[in-house]
Image (tube, rainbow, N blue to C red):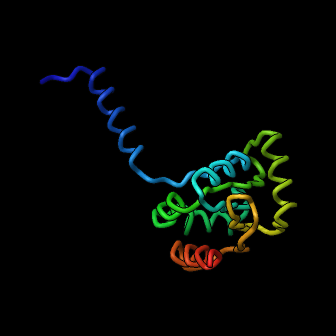
Amino acid sequence: MKLNPLRLFLLVTFALFTARGFAQEAHWNTDFKKAQAQAQAENKKLLMNFTGSDWCPWCIKMDKDVLDKKEFKDYAAKNLVLVLVDFPNSKHQTKHVQDQNNDLKKKYNADGFPTFVLADKDGNEIGRQVGYLEGGPTAFITKLDSFKK
């Protein structure tokens, strides 16, 4: 059977979307209200990442060493709704996101970066990790699990 270019394209596209649908990936939300609604619907905890994603060296290191790793992504997909509360220097954000992030920073008293706040589905703080945590995803997951007990 000979595949013409259009059929080949459609076949590859279908395969990619199907594989993506089965993969569990962590997704960082930028809209707190939507993330909270998702957490309530799925009965999950909220993990807020207060970061300076494009200028804070410890934030960038935490992303690379922990948040971008498969172990954390798998854990997060099963247990958390992730919220990125970013204060970048050069990345564009809408006024809505900037205002929301400033309000969240005040509400959760996040003075340094990175700060991770674990909250219940209603937004009540359960625990926090301030600064970079050594030990990779295993140490960070252990820390998050310790808050839930």
Q: Position of residue 12 (x, y in %)?
A: 31, 33
Give the side of residue 38 with respect to residue 12, left or right: right
Quick check: 106 left or right of 74?
right
The quarter of the displayed image where residue 130 is located: bottom right
| Residue at image point 86% right, 54% down | 103
Q: Could you tell me residue 57's position as x and y percent?
A: 69, 66
**Camera-side residue of 135 and 117:** 117
Q: Nearer the viewer, residue 119 or 12?
A: 119
State whether residue 106 is above or below residue 131: above
Relative image position of residue 131 (x, y in whole percent): 71, 74
Task: Determine the image quadrant of residue 106.
Answer: bottom right
Direction from residue 143 to residue 5 in the image, left or right: left
Q: How many numbered markers are drawn?
A: 0
| Image position of 71 with respect to 142: above or below | above
Tell me the quadrant of the picture where the N terminus can be found.
top left
Please determine whether, in this image, residue 2 is positioned above or below residue 126: above
